[in-house]
Image (cartoon, helix red, strand yellow):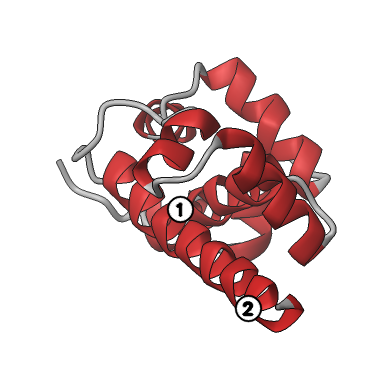
Amino acid sequence: MEHNGNKRAEQITRQYFTFLDQHVEDVANGNAIDFLELNQIADALHISHSHLSDTIQKSTGHHPCHFYDLKIVEKAKLLLIETDLSIAFIAKKLTYDPSNFSKFFKKFTGQTAGEFRKQQKPNNFKSSEKFTTK
């Protein structure tokens, strides 16, 4: 009996992470207007909010919102590294007010989005801007 419970917990955890990956992509690509609340994700997975929270907490040691936020930060990092979009535009793309995004990003990474981008792409901005023709 316990084995079936573990299998179900693993299934719910996998479904949650798969859903998060797709949902964060959908928001970033403009295919979803805003991030869903955790209860809406639970509804989409056909389980109760409390069951989702309890299962993820027991399976991983963290609340589901922890992973939700991490997925958003990971997407922000990719956009900062792989694009030249402004930080304000990235914030809006991820449904954040730019000042709230800065606080959110720093809370999870220990640095601002601008510091992160400069660290990842140290020579990309000042020198490349000199050679850009418009």
Is 47 or 128 nearer to us in this picture? 47
Q: Is residue 28 visible?
A: yes
Q: Secondary structure at mark 1?
A: helix
State whether residue 66 is above or below residue 11: above
Q: Earlier in the sequence, mark 2 or mark 1?
A: 2
Residue found at x 53% / y 46%: 72
Where is residue 73? Give x, y as percent: 59, 48
| Mark seen at residue 20 | 1
Distance of mark 2 from mark 1, alpha carbons? 24 Å
93 sits to left or right of 50: left
95 sits to left or right of 102: left
Count of numbered tags: 2
Is 41 or 123 nearer to us in this picture? 41
Residue found at x 62% / y 19%: 100
Where is residue 55? Give x, y as percent: 69, 55
Residue found at x 57% / y 70%: 8
Residue found at x 27% / y 46%: 26
Q: Please state which amino acid type lies under the numbered disc 1.
A: Leu
Q: Is residue 115 visible?
A: no
Is 103 or 60 nearer to us in this picture? 60
Q: Please state which amino acid type lies under the numbered disc 2.
A: Asn
Where is residue 2? Give x, y as percent: 75, 77
Q: Secondary structure at mark 2?
A: helix
**Given this view, does label 2 or label 1 mark the residue nearer the observer?**
2
| Mark seen at residue 4 | 2
Callout 2: few (<14), some (14-19), or many (20+) C-alpha neighbours within 10 Å? few
